[in-house]
Image: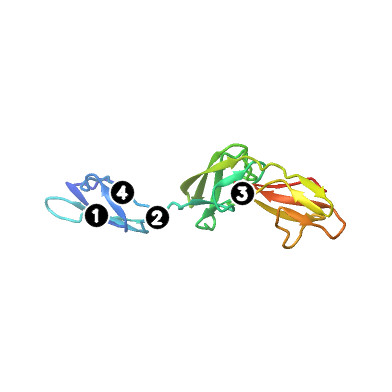
Amino acid sequence: YVDPVAGATDYVWNVNLFGATIVGDATNDTVYVNIANNSTSGVIFVSAHSPCATGLASPSLSVLVNNAPSATITSSNSGFNICLNDSVQLGVTPACTGCTYLWQPAASLSNATVANPYASPSVSTTYTVTVTSNGCSGTASQAFTVLPAATQATITLSNDTLYSSVATSYQWNLNGSPIAGATAAFYRFTANGVYTVTTTDANGCHSTSAPQ
């Protein structure tokens, strides 16, 4: 708005902001300006008019536009599924220097005020993040589905061969370290030690057997 000018009958506003428009009557001493999220900084001018002269006053206002941050939630998994009892790291794109973050719901997160918290929900959950920069905020939401935990694999010993219960994929381990190339449903061992098998089910959830 501009302070009323004595003798003025109307006003002419000039909004020199890309993406900004005047809402309503632009001939009053008060106008509303709609500033789109892609607007740039600029200047707003106003001239007061009277029957005898124009341009009784021409004050201006410099406007600094801080666009609201855009946000998309990402996951360290290939999709938006989480196996029960597992965790996944959440993220926000694009990166935002100097932004603050607030995630909801916070109960199943490692930290609700960082850009990349770890989520460990026990039920399917929709996470929402609010990203704030220079007083402007953007919000994004993403649903995550919690999948049943994988059934723990069991190992059967027959002579010099270990057999795993049925799964989608297998990785045999010796003393806690993966054995290169040992990805079949059975493993013929040649060294003493503690053997386990890590299996993956059809949902992509993992489980490691008890030691054999």
Kindly report the distance in space between the C-alpha atoms of the residues bearing marks 3 and 2. Answer: 46 Å
* Mark 4 or 1: the one toward you: 4
Callout 3 touching callout 2 (CB < 8 Å): no
Say which amino acid is labelled 2. Val
| Residue labelled with disc 3 | 204
The residue singled out by tag 4 in the image is: 33
The amino acid type, in three-letter code, at marker 1 is Ala
C-beta proximity under 8 Å, tags 2 and 1 = no
Q: From the viewer's perspective, is the residue at label 2 or at label 1 nearer? A: 2
Q: Residue furthest left?
A: 51
Q: Judging from the image, what secondary structure is the residue with disc 2 in? A: loop
Up the image or down, 147 lies above or below 200; here it is above
Mark with earlier residue (4, 1): 4
**Horizontally, is 110 left or right of 22 in the view?**
right
In this picture, is 165 found above or below 63? Answer: above
Residue contact at pointers 4 and 1, CB within 8 angstroms: no
Q: Estimate the spatial distance between the alpha carbons at disc 2 and disc 1, rounded to whole Å.
A: 25 Å
Q: How many marks?
A: 4
Which of these two is toward me, 50 or 31?
31
| Distance from the alpha carbon under mark 4 to that under mark 1 | 20 Å
Q: Which residue is mark 1?
A: 57
Q: Residue furthest bottom?
A: 180
Q: Amino acid at mark 4?
A: Val
Which callout, 3 or 1, points at the residue further toward the start of the chain?
1
Q: Which residue is mark 2?
A: 65
> From this viewpoint, which residue is outermost toward the front?
159
One can see residue 8 in this view: no
Calculate the distance from the C-alpha at mark 4 to the C-alpha at mark 2: 12 Å
Label 1 SS: loop
Q: Position of residue 190 (x, y in %)?
A: 84, 60
Marks 4/3: CA–CA distance: 52 Å
